[in-house]
Amino acid sequence: MSILKVNHVKKIYTTRFGKQRVNALEDVTFSVEKGEYVAIMGESGSGKTTLLNILAALDKATSGQVLLNGMDLSTIREKEIAAFRRENLGFVFQDFNLLDTFSLQDNIFLPLVLAGVKYDEMQKRLFPIARKLEIGNILSKYPYEVSGGQKQRTAVARALITNPKLILADEPTGALDSRSSDQLLGLFSDINAEGQTILMVTHSTKAASHAGRVLFIKDGQVYHQIYRGNLTNEELYQKISDTLTMIATGGGRYE
Ligand SMILES: Nc1ncnc2c1ncn2[C@@H]1O[C@H](COP(=O)(O)OP(=O)(O)OP(=O)(O)O)[C@@H](O)[C@H]1O
Ligand SMILES: [Mg+2]
């Protein structure tokens, strides 16, 4: 079953005073099946964040359609969007987006507090997630008291605690050193193996080599895609590198 369907999405930004138009997305079509782990790659400015913002209903497509779990995002009423997002999506941002005046635990609880979940239930959900993420013993600390990797794992816990249908991640390893980045990628692989659907935007070939499928965006379209098949991470890494080179030199359009 497709959890996400993106049909011919186009996004044109008009700058102030309408002087300039930027075609950020020309015609993007793809779908994500339940349980998939998909990476999206593309050069800076190719429209990756634009696409994620549209999928997250933080921005609207100029034309085209996005179906999340069968629901057309454009039909959700403005005042229901926040609840829809909370119930269906988990976000992991490059810069963590934790609140400095909240402890790690309260940061993780935030989406549940907003959803009106009882404290006992929040605690019950937190325990296994905190254990898996190895942050159980630092939950009472504040974001400025912990490392970048610990902050990012807290952000992942906050994304997971609502049992989202889909996790959207924008450069989740972007601000991490290689050890923390490996840990985060291992974690994404684990939660994906347990059935969590993940869509991750990344510049990192290493990060993308953990996914089951890699989409390449260029010229506002899905220009190419590769499936892992039976490849190991190392083999997929090589294939992604080759594909990036091929795309940079103008070859390899699929379809
Ligand atoms: N609010 C905006 N108004 C006008 N143009 C914008 C706006 N946001 C993005 N753009 C333009 O749209 C294009 C796509 O930007 P986007 O941020 O989606 O790229 P990206 O692939 O995420 O890049 P990066 O890898 O650098 O994060 C760029 O040309 C950018 O300058
Ligand atoms: Mg971006």
Image (spheres, rainbow, N blue to C red):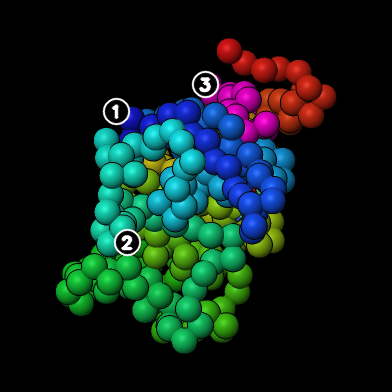
Is 91 magenta? The answer is no
- Nearest the viewer among 169 and 212 is 169
Q: Amino acid at mark 2?
A: Ala
Counting residues from the N terminus, which is met first, the one under dot 1 or under dot 2?
Answer: 1
Q: Amino acid at mark 3?
A: Gly
**Residue 150 in the image: x percent, y percent?**
54, 70
Stretch in magenta: 218-237
User: Which residue lies under the disc numbered 1?
Assistant: 1
**Residue 35 in the image: x percent, y percent?**
36, 36
Q: Secondary structure at mark 3?
A: loop
Q: Amino acid at mark 1?
A: Met
Quadrant showing the C terminus: top right
Quadrant showing the N terminus: top left
Is 227 magenta? The answer is yes
Q: Quadrant of residue 23?
A: top right
Q: Pointers 1 and 2 in contact (CB under 8 A)?
A: no
Q: Secondary structure at mark 2?
A: helix
Q: Residue at x 47, y 42 (%)?
A: 61
Mark 1 Cα shell of 10 Å, populated few (<14), some (14-19), many (≥20):
few
Counting residues from the N terminus, which is met first, the one under dot 2 or under dot 3?
Answer: 2
Q: Is residue 234 visible?
A: no
User: Which residue lies under the disc numbered 3?
Assistant: 229
Respond yes or no on whether mark 1 lies under 8 Å from ligand 1. no
Q: Is residue 111 visible?
A: yes
User: Which residue lies under the disc numbered 2?
Assistant: 82
Mark 2 Cα shell of 10 Å, populated few (<14), some (14-19), many (≥20):
some
Q: Is residue 188 left or right of residue 146?
A: left
**Residue 183 in the image: x percent, y percent?**
56, 55
Q: Residue at x 67, y 31 (%)?
A: 219
